[in-house]
Amino acid sequence: MITKQHTHVLSRVHLFLAFFSIALGGTFGLLQGLVRAGAITLPSWLSYYQILTAHGLLLALISTTYFIFAFLLAGNGATLGDLSKTEYTLAKWGTIVLTAGVILAATMILKGDASVLYTFYLPLQASPWFYVGLALFVIGTWLFAAGLIHQYFAWRKAHPGQKTPLFAFLGTVTLLLWIIASLGVAATVLFQMIPLSFGWVQGVNVELSRTLFWYFGHPLVYFWLLPTYMAWYTVMPRLIGGKLFSDTLARFAFLLFLVFSFPVGIHHQLTEPGIQDGWKFFQVILTFMVVIPSLMTAFNVFASLESVPRTAGQRRSLFGWIGALPWGDVRFLAMIIAMLFFIPGGIGGLVNASYQMNAMVHNTLFVVGHFHITVGTPVMLTFFAISYWLIPHLTGRTFTPLANRLGILQTVIWSLGMLIMSWTQHALGLMGAPRRTAYTVYQNHPQAQVWFDTPWANYTLMAIGGALLFTGIVLMLVIVIYLGFFAPRSEKATFPLAEARDDGPQPAFLENWKLWLTITAVLILIAYTVPIFDILAHNAPLARGMRTW
């Protein structure tokens, strides 16, 4: 029989692998910053682009996936109950397969046979075993997701007429989004990259590969963000002693994310000539539609925060409720800082998605700064906040005052490091500094010298920000080890879930999955059918694989 203990063990495995990936990825990130600033020179057996590839994949794809799966698995156990034998088998074998894929792909990177960067664009060609590893990773995630999705629908079948728990509903949307999104990267890996790298075909259509990648690449951002929003919806109100403002609004916002996150990937390809301008413009418009559920989320979360002090009668002035929030609790503090960082991150996203402004920043450090301020803080800092109570929940230990003090220090260091580094990257990008390049002065060109000499934004300052972030990672690992193995034991560690103020019947259309999946499919077909047909019809010369390192 599958018990809660089995689920907790599997969740702990995912958490361990997530933080191990963060440790490795953070180390490579520190080395990148020091190399870029000219502070160190890497040994001959380790290249800049090798660590750049490892850094991107470990932090942006691998660590996030492991953490999200740990979070969703534990949350489903707290809301839906124990997994069935079939569901547990799917989750367990999914973990094994995706981990085997990670090990295989990471081995190829560390051997120097896959320095193709985070996006692994064709025609850059890695070892075929790198792509086999990626395929195993995706297949493993599908198996794991199938187990949790089956648990959700089995619960619905066993409880007809009852409203499903909010956490499980939001988690199911997140997993469906991942499965639909990863179909794009699975297609290019299986039918283009693996055949090319094994020599089974002489060339590939690069434009098609990039389009399939970005069909996956932009929804991937929401695969990171939706669990973050889940914590803001279902946990944060509980931590402050309140309730979620609206359960219904949260469900509706997630369904809109599911619908609008797919037909937007071409806004990453605005500078590419193989796609008609009209279809680029269409997907830019759809990109801005994602603002709607984002604003719905912001309203719902801040309404939840404001209502607690006002209900308690602590503060009655317009903004007095802000001071009444539990700023001394790092489980709250880390999440609220993550939310505040997302405001400039979202504004930067509007720049990247704008048809004309994108041309100014497209291949510069501005994009790297945007990526770090949207993933590195709203997502990663929220994941750290989750860890402060999730680890005690899974290990039966106590979140102590010592852990809280260390967590506040870690949050301050991380926030300061990200503020310095992302600000510098944005500014350097506007000065023309390129991304994806190792240390270079471009033969002492005056423009390149500006990137080193500008007092308020230079490569050295960027490296300092990276060093602070690495310090934050080390401190976080100390906290994780303490909470997992050394904190006092307790039977009271729970999975904190908030109730909603509108805890009544919900509109039936919110769980009409045929409706929402059909709308999603129709929008995908509208947005991608003609562009992909044009790419195939142009009969462009096929590109051979290239190894440039």
Image (tube, grey):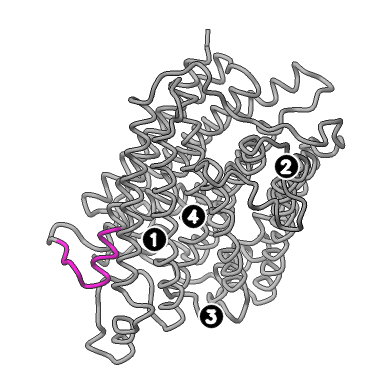
Quarter residue 368 falls in:
bottom left
Q: Amino acid at mark 3?
A: Ala
> Can you tell which mark lies on residue 308?
2
Q: Amino acid at mark 1?
A: Gly
Assign a secondary structure to mark 3: helix
Task: Report which residue position mark 4 lands on.
Answer: 377
Query: Distance from label 1 to label 2 (Cα)?
Result: 32 Å
Q: Residue 492 at x, y = what percent?
A: 53, 19
Classed neighbour count for the residue bearing mark 3: other residues with Cα under 10 Å, few (<14), some (14–19), many (≥20):
some
Closer to the chain start, of discs 1 and 3, is: 3
Classed neighbour count for the residue bearing mark 2: other residues with Cα under 10 Å, few (<14), some (14–19), many (≥20):
many
Depth order, front residue of 211/381: 381
In the image, residue 70 sits, relative to residue 351, either above or below, namely above
Q: Residue 360 at x, y = what percent?
A: 51, 82
Assign a secondary structure to mark 4: helix
Q: Is residue 167 left or right of residue 271?
A: right
